[in-house]
Amino acid sequence: MSGPAVPAVFHLRRARDLIDRHYAEPLDLDAMARAAGFSRYHFARGFRAAYGETPGQYLTRRRVERAQDLLRSANLTVTEICYLVGFSSLGSFSARFSELVGASPTAYRTVHAERGAPRVPGCFVMAWGRPGATTASTEKPAAVERP
């Protein structure tokens, strides 16, 4: 006897959570579909029906949302932010950002800079975003061989 059927949205949510956690990494439709336990075509149709946009559109939107946060708060170049959030080219990043936000990344930053938002130094953002990064105070000193 098997248990009650699990609604498809629970499976789709696993894939959406994967996108939310790993938006900066290269994610393809096959990886997202595997997370949901669906074939890629069934997954793409189901995701769009459940969330109103394709998995690719959702991933792009999440990346642009994160870029907006960084443009408002981090002292990083637009190019650095482009790569940090998972885009592979500055041109595609700028085009998608402008399409979704209604302003270029530089114009968006300028508007928020005029509001006097505090800026986090880029080195902190870069260190914070690296998995497994450690600080000098927590690293153990290397063993020194004595003759």
Image (tube, grey):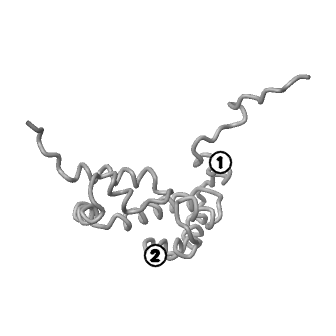
Q: Is residue 130 left or right of residue 66?
A: right
Q: Is residue 94 above or below residue 16?
A: below
Q: Is 8 left or right of 146, judged from the image as shown? A: left
Q: Nearer the viewer, residue 83 or 33?
A: 33
| Secondary element at tag 1 | helix
Q: Determine the residue located farthest toward the left in the rendered image.
A: 1
Cβ–Cβ under 8 Å for marks 2 and 1 = no
Quadrant the C terminus occupies = top right
Image point 65% across, 58% down: which residue?
Answer: 75
The residue to which callout 1 is attached is 124
Q: Position of residue 32 (x, y in %)?
A: 36, 57
Question: Relative to 13, is 114 above or below?
Answer: below
- Residue 134: which quarter of the image? top right
Residue at 55 percent across and 70 percent down: it is 105
Residue 127 is left or right of residue 6, and the answer is right
Foreground tag (2 vs 1):
1
Label 1 crowd (10 A; few <14 / some 14-19 / many >=20): few
